[in-house]
Amino acid sequence: MMAPAIEQAIRAQCEQARASSRVLAAASPGQKDAALAAVARRLVADAGAVLEANRRDVASARERGLSEAMIDRLALDAPRLERMARGVLEVQALGDPVGEVEGMGRRPNGLLVGQVRVPLGVVAMVYESRPDVTVDAAVLCLKSGNAVVLRGGSEAAASNEALGAVVRAALVEAGLPADAVQLVPPGDRDAIRVLVGMTGLLDLVIPRGGEGLIRFVTEHARVPVIQHYQGVCHLFVDQGADVAMALALVVDGKAVRPGVCNALECLLVHEADAAALLAALGPVAAQHAVELRGCARTVALLPGVRPAADDDFGREFLAKVLAVKVVSGLDEALGHVARYGSGHTEAICTPSYASSQRWLREVDASCVLVNASTRFNDGGQLGLGAEIGISTTKLHAYGPMGLVSLTTKKWIVYGEGQTRG
Amino acid sequence: MMAPAIEQAIRAQCEQARASSRVLAAASPGQKDAALAAVARRLVADAGAVLEANRRDVASARERGLSEAMIDRLALDAPRLERMARGVLEVQALGDPVGEVEGMGRRPNGLLVGQVRVPLGVVAMVYESRPDVTVDAAVLCLKSGNAVVLRGGSEAAASNEALGAVVRAALVEAGLPADAVQLVPPGDRDAIRVLVGMTGLLDLVIPRGGEGLIRFVTEHARVPVIQHYQGVCHLFVDQGADVAMALALVVDGKAVRPGVCNALECLLVHEADAAALLAALGPVAAQHAVELRGCARTVALLPGVRPAADDDFGREFLAKVLAVKVVSGLDEALGHVARYGSGHTEAICTPSYASSQRWLREVDASCVLVNASTRFNDGGQLGLGAEIGISTTKLHAYGPMGLVSLTTKKWIVYGEGQTRG
């Protein structure tokens, strides 16, 4: 049970964010950009306070025995703050999506009707240990005219508070309300449950972190949620595919950053070329320390490969492990992806026009690629400039979410007294 | 508690819809249009079976003592079926949004990147008594390439089943899977709870009906929901507004169809012109049998008006009742709308350029109008051709939802072997 006092405190923060969102929505691009410039300046100027807070988080993480990998994600230093500041200026330099008018035209009765892009209003972010998310999320929300309620993890509590103070001070410096950025103190998951139940005060919740956190938010949310659970990404190597290209896509997808959501998890190989492709794959996988787990036909063609368990298909390994399956052709590959894919990223390597067209049309995923690495499903790589997350929720955001995904469109109507009758 | 057998049956229906959605998504515009033409033809050709089923629903409604207004909404006859068929042909004639490509361009590394419009996948509709929704929803979902799971009210059970059979037969006639349209038998609300909890099988739930139904769906959904609870629509009559225009907008908004969601519920009057405007409003309201409920200043200016209770502001009367409040100017009107509006439809009547610009920019509602009736917030009126509902959920659909609101965009990437490294 949540103490009523905490519930009231979270509600009060959401109400302050809601009130501030009116001001943010009406703020000019210049005013929002001034706030972002102030954030970047203060990240460097106020580095002392942020780094001091971060040292407390890191010390407490060591005491609690967190892994060095987690501590590395948590730890800040001056160069990291400078990189963060440069990232803020990159967002500042992006075009402001708010106010763009689309489809304006005159109706038969003379009404002038169109749609104008507007902020969502109040966005809540629920995330885990990395303190950079605090600044990234705040800055993307502010640039797109939204107020934001941030709820980071307890490991980064002091760092997040210090970074939040930087952003709030920058807002005040630019003449905007500090309350447009709210930090909900970390606590147990009950506080998340309360936060994501704030119907009428929040317009969207974006959870970022492990699958457990995302499922918890989805289960308890009473406001719209945009998220992805997993990235179970496939590459289908079609008949006649260039072997060198196929291997390069495997290495790029699996060996460079195996822990990210757009990494490759499963290779599907057309049976016509399976022998040659797998013979070439064996040594390349060994060279990059990638463990293969093969279907029966794969094992028959490439002796020594560990047989895949049933649940190795549809699995996000987050490690240098790759499931491999020989398929009879494009139809079986499409069926496999429809069954085991997570709607995230799916690639084909093919010389065939017909196969490429069917793949692009029939695969249901936020990003579908021909002859390119799954690792390109990323806001920066696809040209969005910055991303607040990747969505496999099929709403306005399907794929990387940039500034436009933090807005919607309202209808505007210019009349001269028209009635409908 | 829901019997496991019913839960299994609903899950099986959702799985059939999911499987069919792959076929629908890949269907050509011509094939989908052929299915719609067959629906229109069969609505007339199979009218006998539909009207027979409808007679059973109407008889049982009379037995259970439903009001004549409800029976009128339920009852079908040959002309109504012909109108339904014409509506289906109007949807057929609309452009197919699926496959439209946006923003295609080349990245620095040579990748050709764009977004293509795709169906959402499986849409669930939960609605109440009117059987026309069965055909409207099925046809809009099919045209936009979606499978649909329909759960109508028990009053229209036989009619919905007969209309569903018409649509399913039409799909088969066009070579498409009948299972793309599923009808969940009405029962108690537990069946709705089960349906809207089908994470991974449904992409969107659209509830249509009374506020109780919509809140129930929102409370229990574990998949995205798009809806509106209420339409609490305001008209602000600014200083210097044309009195005849203002009165025409009031009459159109309140007296023509007071029970609809875009009807007017509250009139805000600038204090500078309040005396003249209210003096003119009194007799017009009386003539149209509209009951006014005024703030203290309204009552002082127009003696005999019933004083408004506190909860008359922010209230959806769904009747010929209008709350009236004198405000000090635009700022107070904007504040009132921000506090009491439901994000649905908000209009201003003004001769002022500055007021009109601020209203359009600062009011947060799905449709914001200048010198036009709130009744124009409607898919047909705004040029969408047809609508499946009006959304005040601020996602891709904010306002009337037409075919495009039943789609999203996936990223497509054409490469020549690019890797990210």
Image: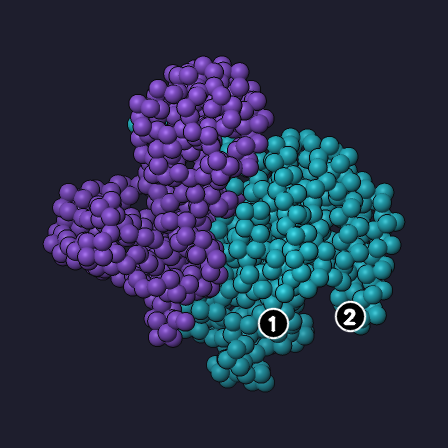
Chain colours: A cyan, B purple
C-alpha gap between disc 1 and disc 2: 21 Å
Q: Residue at x 56, y 20 (%)?
A: B354
Q: Amino acid at mark 2?
A: Leu
Q: Residue at x 54, y 28 (%)?
A: B333
Q: Amino acid at mark 1?
A: Phe
Q: Would residue B331 be found to the left or right of residue A83 on screen?
A: left
Above or below — where is A52 with respect to A408? Answer: below
- Residue B335 locus on image (x, y percent): 57, 32
Q: Earlier in the sequence, mark 1 or mark 2?
A: 2
Furthest-front residue in view?
B304
Quadrant assignment, res B96: top left
Pinpoint the chain carrying mark 2. Answer: A
Say few, some or many: other residues with alpha carbon within 10 Å of mark 1 (under 14 / 14 to 19 / 20 or more): many
Q: Nearer the viewer, mark 1 or mark 2?
A: 2
What kind of element bears circle 1? loop
Residue placed under numbered mark 2 in the picture: A66
Residue placed under numbered mark 1 in the picture: A317
Say few, some or many: other residues with alpha carbon within 10 Å of mark 2 (under 14 / 14 to 19 / 20 or more): few
What's the mark number on residue A261?
A: none
Residue in the foreground of this view, choosing between A185 and A140: A185
